[in-house]
Amino acid sequence: MLLALAAPPAAADTRIAVLDFELKDLTLAPGIPAEIARTASIKPLLTQELESAGYRIVEIPADARQAADSGVGYLFDHADAAAALAKSYGADYVLVGRLHKPSFLFAYLMVHLVRVSDGSLVGNYITESKGPNAGLTGKAVESLTVKIDHDLERRYSPPPPQKRVIDSK
């Protein structure tokens, strides 16, 4: 009985839905395959980082997301609609993201953290990523995860810096 009182509390079971990121490409050559692929890579990277911190990821089927999305940027701009979608899948929070690319030289990873219970915007995060390579996108995702976790449970530790040249693919 005394051991039960001395045991550390169990980690919270926070459930987070991570929606697919959308690409908002304002360059003169929008929608090139490399940018579409980079945008598609962000959700799995973010999901992996959040899972490594002990958050439970709630999957929302693509068809449900598409049905809730009234157009490009709708869920990003309407926290209440994103919350209603995530609520039906049992999430506590939903992350709605965008890769905003105003230039060939850099892009912004933008994320809204929405509390599902009341549809309120808890956090608005922006991280700059210079260059198109996967290594830099991964570092930007780690930076986003630090910011998101700071407003939730503060249990994420990014991986240590690697002593290698960042992949230029």
Image (cartoon, rainbow, N blue to C red):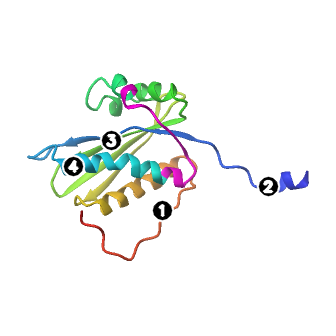
Residue type (three-letter) at the residue carrying disc 4: Glu
Q: Is residue 35 left or right of residue 154?
A: left
The answer to which quarter of the image holds residue 134 is bottom left
Q: Of label 1 and label 4, which has the lower sequence position?
A: 4
Q: Which residue is mark 4?
A: 35
Decide which of 64, 148 is in the foreground and name it.
Answer: 64
Which badge, 2 or 1, comes first in the chain's sequence? 2
- Of marks 2 and 4, the one in the foreground: 4
Residue 123 at x, y percent in the picture: 44, 42
Q: Where the C terminus falls, by quadrant?
A: bottom left
119 relative position to 140: left or right: right
**Marks 2/4: CA distance?**
48 Å
Whole-Å distance between the Cαs marked 2 and 1?
A: 26 Å
Q: CA distance from mark 1 to mark 4?
A: 25 Å
Check residue 7 in the rendering and tell me which mark sits there, or answer none: 2
Percent position of residue 121, x then y: 44, 35
Q: Which residues are magenta?
A: 50-64
Residue type indicated by callout 1: Pro
Q: Secondary structure at mark 1?
A: loop
> Picture coordinates of residue 141 (x, y %)?
38, 54
Q: Nearer the viewer, mark 1 or mark 4?
A: 4
Name the residue at 53% across, 33% down.
91
Q: Secondary structure at mark 2?
A: loop
N-terminal of the two: label 4 or label 3? 3
Picture layout, residue 11 above or below residue 94: below
Q: Which residue is mark 3?
A: 21
- Check disc 1 and report the residue beneath it: 158
Badge 2 density bin: few <14, some 14–19, many ≥20, Cα 10 Å:
few
Q: What residue is at 47 percent from the left and 55 percent from the top?
A: 146
Characterize the local packing of mark 3: few (<14), some (14-19) or many (20 or more) Cα atoms within 10 angstroms: many
At a point 33% along the width and 41% down the height, the residue shown is: 21
